[in-house]
């Protein structure tokens, strides 16, 4: 049986639950190098990087619902704890919710 995003609430963020600017400590509950991937697709890059860099924090932003759900499911199945995903439009999300100078690295592929 395929799991859905609702079965991995620790991985899946919702825009409507965010109020004001948030930093990586609020998102992950810990410090660490903060990466944002814009257009996460199926989550392959995020999974590989999260496993290679377990002390870093990775936020994936994906607009397409089916890819977002696939990536959330993938992170859940691999039990990755340093990745969060959100389904939204990246430019407005970053502008509205991510503080200036708080991201260490952006990934756009």
Image (cartoon, rainbow, N blue to C red):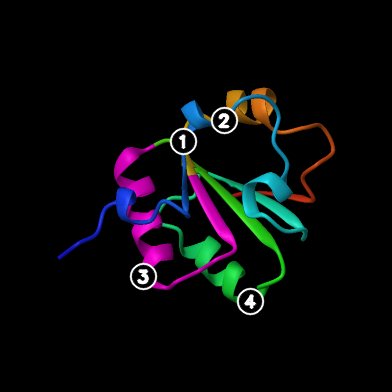
In 3D space, how far apart are the residues under numbered discs 2 and 4 (Cα atoms)? 29 Å
- Tell me, yes or no, whether the highlighted magenta stretch contains residue 65: yes
In 3D space, how far apart are the residues under numbered discs 4 and 1 (Cα atoms)? 26 Å
Secondary element at tag 2: loop
Q: Earlier in the sequence, mark 4 or mark 3?
A: 4
Q: Earlier in the sequence, mark 4 or mark 1?
A: 1
Q: Which residue is mark 2?
A: 18
Q: Is residue 88 above or below residue 46?
A: above
Q: Dividing the picture into quarters, in which one does residue 26 lie?
A: top right
In 3D space, how far apart are the residues under numbered discs 1 and 3 (Cα atoms)? 20 Å
62 relative position to 98: left or right: left
Q: Which residues are magenta?
A: 64-85
Which mark lies nearer to you, 3 or 2?
A: 2
In 3D space, how far apart are the residues under numbered discs 1 and 2 (Cα atoms)? 7 Å
Q: Which residue is mark 1?
A: 14
Identity of the residue drawn at 36% across and 70% down? 77
Q: Residue 36 versus residue 79: which sits nearer the camera?
A: 79
Q: How far across and down, in percent of the image, does residue 99 sit?
A: 77, 32
Taking the view exactly as shown, the residue that stands out farthest to the left is: 1
Q: Is residue 5 above or below residue 53?
A: above
Q: Which residue is mark 4?
A: 52
Q: Which residue is mark 3?
A: 77
Whether residue 55 can be seen here: yes
Q: Residues within 10 Å of mark 1 (few under 14, many from 20)?
A: few
Secondary element at tag 1: loop
Q: Dividing the picture into quarters, in which one does residue 70 lie?
A: bottom left
Could you tell me if the residues under marks 1 and 2 are in contact, i.e. CB atoms within 8 Å? yes
Q: How far across and down, in percent of the image, does residue 5 sit?
A: 33, 50
Q: Earlier in the sequence, mark 1 or mark 3?
A: 1
Which mark lies nearer to you, 2 or 4?
A: 2
Q: Earlier in the sequence, mark 2 or mark 4?
A: 2
């Amino acid at each position: 049986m395929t799991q859905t995003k609702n079965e991995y609430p620790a991985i899946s963020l919702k825009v409507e639950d965010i109020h004001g600017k948030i930093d990586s400590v609020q998102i992950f509950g810990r410090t660490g190098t903060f990466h944002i991937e814009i257009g996460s697709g199926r989550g392959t890059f995020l999974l590989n990087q999260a496993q290679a860099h377990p002390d870093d924090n990775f936020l994936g932003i994906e607009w397409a619902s089916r890819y977002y759900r696939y990536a959330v499911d993938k992170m859940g199945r691999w039990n990755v704890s340093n990745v969060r995903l959100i389904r939204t439009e990246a430019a407005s999300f970053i502008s509205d919710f991510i503080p200036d100078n708080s991201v260490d690295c952006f990934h756009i592929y």
